[in-house]
Amino acid sequence: MTFLTVCMLACFSQQAFAATTVWQKAEEIMKDVYNQILLISTIAAVVTASIALLMMNFSKSGKTVDEARAWLKRIIITWAILNGLGFIVSYITPFFAGGKWGTP
């Protein structure tokens, strides 16, 4: 009876394999979060750049035009850095595949 129980237990038990690992799920979540941040930052950059351009075009004060131009430069640089981070990460990540430095 014990032999039969062990054999039946072995036949009916199945190992559960995860479809994705914790690291794959974390990578998926981070990509989603980064895409959401990029979307929000792009919208914010367009809105604030539009305001800065309107201030540059319709202002009668030279000081306001200079400040608007400085803000426009800051907005463009920040937006380029945020977009560049995704490019850098996607370019460098394959070098570290499998926890080893080298070619993918």
Image (cartoon, rainbow, N blue to C red):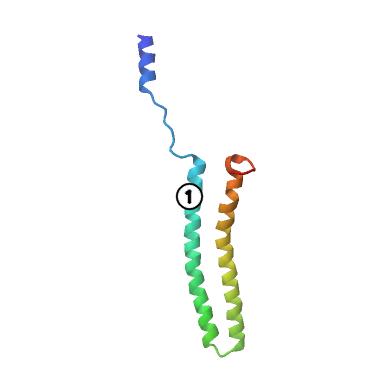
How many numbered dots are placed on residues in this image?
A: 1
In this view, the residue farthest toward the top is 1
Quarter of the view holding residue 14 = top left
Residue drawn at 51 percent across, 47 percent down: 27
- Up-down relation of residue 46 to residue 53 (above or below): above
- Using a 10 Å C-alpha cutoff, classify the residue at mark 1 as few (fewer than 14 neighbours), some (14 to 19) or many (20 or more): few
What residue do we see at 41% from left, 31% from top?
A: 16
Residue at the spot of label 1? 29
* SS class, disc 1: helix
Image coordinates for residue 13, horizontal then vertical, percent: 38, 23
Find residue 67 and report its horizontal and vertical position in percent: 60, 80
Front-most of residues 98 and 28: 98
- In this view, the residue farthest toward the bottom is 60
Image position, residue 32 (x, y; %): 47, 54
Q: Quadrant of the C terminus?
A: top right
Say which amino acid is labelled 1.
Ile
Q: Is 46 placed left or right of 92 in the picture?
A: left
Q: Quadrant of the N terminus?
A: top left
Q: Nearer the viewer, residue 91 or 62?
A: 91
45 relative to 8, above or below: below
Give 84 or 9, whichever is nearer the viewer: 84
Left or right position of 7 against 48: left
- Residue at image position (49%, 67%) is 42
**Residue 21 pos. (x, y %):** 48, 39
> Residue at the right extreme?
101
